[in-house]
Image (spheres, grey):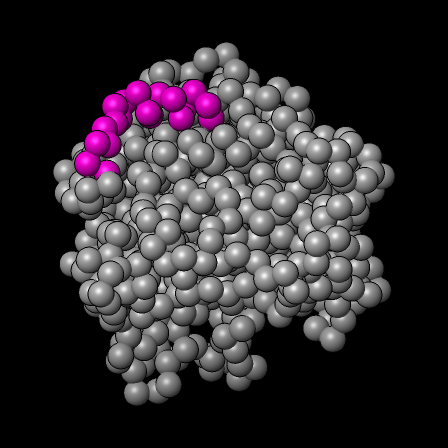
Amino acid sequence: MKKSYKHIFILGLILVGFTACSEDFLERAPLSDVTPEFYLKSEADLAAYAISNYSFPSHAGWNAGTFTYDNGTDNQASTSASNLWVPGQYRVGTNGGAWNFDRIRTLNYFLDVVIPRYEAGEISGNETYIKHYIGEIYFLRAYEYFNKLKSVGDFPIIKNLLPDVKEELIIASQRRPRNEVARFILSDLDKAIDMLTNIDPNKNRISPMVAQLFKSRVALYEGTWLNYHKGTAHVPGGPGWPGANKDYLSGFSINIDSEIDFFLTEAMNAAEVVASSVNLTPNNGDTEGTDVFNNPYYAMFGDLDMSSYSEVLLWRDYDEALVSHHTMHYLKNGANTGYTKGYVDSYLMKNGLPIYAGGSGYNGDDYIADVLDDRDDRLRLFTKEPGDVITYINGETFEEVPGLLEISEIRAVTGYSVRKGIYPDANMLDGANPTVTGSIVFRASEAYLNYIEADYVKNGSLDGNSASYWGQLRTRAGLPADYNITIAATDLSQENDWAKYSQGELVDPTLYNIRRERRSEFIAEGMRLDDLKRWRALDQVSNYVIEGFKVWGPMKAWYENPDGSSQLRAEPDASPNVSPESNSMYIRPYQIVQANNNFYNGYNWNPAHYLSPIAFNHFLITSEGGDANNSVIYQNPGWLIEAGTAAQ
C-alpha cells in the first residue's frame, strides 16, 4: 500500500491550511470549525495528516536546493555572508524566531485526538498502517523538538494541547534543561520505532531505519554538545547557566558525565542498527566523461528515482504536474556558492596522505585539474572542472571556466563549483523547464559516521565495528581502508580546518580524522554548522578570511578578452570584480570591495552565537504585569532581554 510523497502533496497543502496556526503565544486549543469531529477517523485521514507535516530540508523553487546549505561555513561561501560571523550585527529580535509552537501544536493535536480513538478501536483501516502513521507523528514531533534543541537549547516540553488560559500557558512556558529535552526526543523516537513499519518500498515515507538513524543523530548531537560545552553556561548546571536563577528549576541537578555517557551509548546503539543492516551505495571508480553518470555513488544524488539505492533511507519525490524545483538550472552554473580553499585542501590524496605530507603526490593548485588529480574520489566526483560533461541527454554540454564574474545568483563564488546532484538531461538545466530530480533526506552513511564518532568520544578508542565502518567509507572514496595511514601522517599545524579545535584547543589526530571523514562524506549536504557548534569548534575563529581557487595564478588567463586584456578588475576605483593579488593569489570573495563591508577582515565568532537569542516579545507575553524581566522564560547565555541588542 504505497503512499507517495508527491501524490499526497496537494492534499497536504490543504491540510496545512486547516491545521497549522501562527500564534504569538504558546498554545491554543483548535477551533471546532477548523477541524471537524469526523476527521482523523480513518487510515487515509491519518496518512494525509502525517505527510502534510513533512518539513524536511529538500529542493524547492528557484535556487540550488540543499546543495547550498553549507554556505556561511568554512566549507562553502556565497556572494553574501551571514551576520552570525559579525559580533554586534547578529541581534535579539522583536518577535518571531525559533521560539514558537505552531508545528508542535499541530502534532500534539493529532496525538490527543488519535491515540484515544486508536485505543478504543474507532479508526477504520488496516491496523498496521494506522500504527505506522501514529509513529510518523511521534517522529515528526521529535524532529521539530530537535530543531528547537539546536537553536535555543533549553525548551518547554509540551506533550498535549493546552487550554486557552493565560496562567496555565505561562506555567507551560517554563523551560526545561536541554538534556531533558533531548531525552524527551529520544522517547518519542522510541515510540516511533515501535510503531513504524516499512510501509513504502519507494522510500518516500518515514521508516524504522529512518527513525533509528535520526535517533543516533540526536543522541550524538547532545552527547557531544554536553561533552565539549561542559563547564560553560551552555550546559545545564554549568557556571552562569541562566536556568539556575529560576525557582522552578531550583531542584534541578545533573551528573554531566553520566548524561554524556548515556547519549553516546544511545547514539552507538541506534547507529549500529542501521550500519549493520544497510549497505553503502557502491562507487565504481568512474569519475570522468559520461561514465560518471553510470557511477551509482555519483548518480544517487541527482537521480529521478532514488528508491533503488541501498543507502537512501528517505527521499523526496517530485512530479512535474504537482511540484518541481529548479536546482539543475543553478547547478549548471556556479549556483551562488563554491567550496572554500580550506575545504578542498582538507581532502586526502588517494594514497591516504594529506596534501602536505611527503610522498603525497599532490600536484599543486595552479589549475583545478591539478587540485583534483589523484584525490579522494568524493572531491573529484562532486567538484566541477572545465571540460566536465554536464549533460548528454537532449543536448551535450560541458563545464566552462568558473563564472566568477556572473550575476550573484549564478556566480561561481570561489571557483570551486558544486558538481553534486546534476542530472544529465539538458532540458532540466533550462530554467524555463521544471526539474524533478529527487532530494535525499536521510542516507545510511551518516549512521556509519555517527557510530565511529560516538565510540571514540565515549571510549577513547575504536572497536571492531568502528574499524569496519570507517574502512568501508574510505574504500568507497577510493582511499586505503587503513585509516592509520592518514592518522600517522597528520600534522594539525598544517590543517586549515576549524574542526581541529574543540574548546579553543587542538584535538588529537585520530579524532580530527574522524571529523575529516565526516566533512569529506557530507560534501554540500548542509551538515557542517551543526557539527561545528556541537564540537564547540568555533571559539578560536577570529579574522578568518575565506579563500577560493588561485585566480592570480595561470588560471587568470581564463578571463582574458580576445585582445589579451583581462576581464579581472581589482583596483578599488575601477568597479572591482575580484580581490586584489596584493591580498592573496587566491580569490577572496569578501575582499572585493572594502567600503561598508563587515566581512572584509574575515569571520569572527562570539560564543553567545552557539545558541540563538529568544525574541523580546516572548518575554512580554509570558510575564505578569507586562514586565519582560519577570517572565518565566530566561534568555540564552550572552544575550539580553532587549530587542535590537547584540550579544555581550
Location of residue 162 with respect to 442 vertically, above or below? below
Residue, x 54% and y 44% (percent of image)?
Answer: 141
Residue 591 is drawn in which quadrant? bottom left
Residue 530 on image: x %, y %: 41, 45
Q: Quadrant of the N terminus?
A: top right
Q: Is residue 514 left or right of residue 6?
A: left
Q: Quadrant of the C terminus?
A: bottom left
Q: Say if the magenta span includes residue 258.
A: yes
Q: Main secondary structure of the magenta part?
A: helix
Report the span colored magenta: 249-267
> Who is closer to the viewer here, 553 or 305?
305
Position of 436 compared to 32: left or right?
right
| Residue 179 falls within the magenta-colored stretch | no
Q: Out of 626 and 464, give the one closest to the viewer.
A: 626
* Most distant residue in the top direction: 464
Residue 598 lies, in percent from the top left, at 27, 71
Kindly identify the residue that appears in the image at 66 percent across and 59 percent down.
35
Describe residue 272's horizontal placement relative to residue 517 as left or right.
Answer: right
Query: Which of the pair 238/371 is nearer the observer?
Result: 238
Q: Quadrant of residue 594?
A: bottom left
Residue at coordinates 34% horizontally, 55% vertically from top-left? 167
Q: Is residue 636 visible?
A: yes
Residue 41, x across and y down, in percent: 75, 46
Which residue is drawn at the image coordinates 74% and 75% (left, top)?
432
Q: Report the number of discs.
A: 0
Specify the quadrant of the image occupied by residue 229: top left
Residue 553 in sight from this viewpoint: no
Position of residue 466 relative to residue 300, above or below, is above
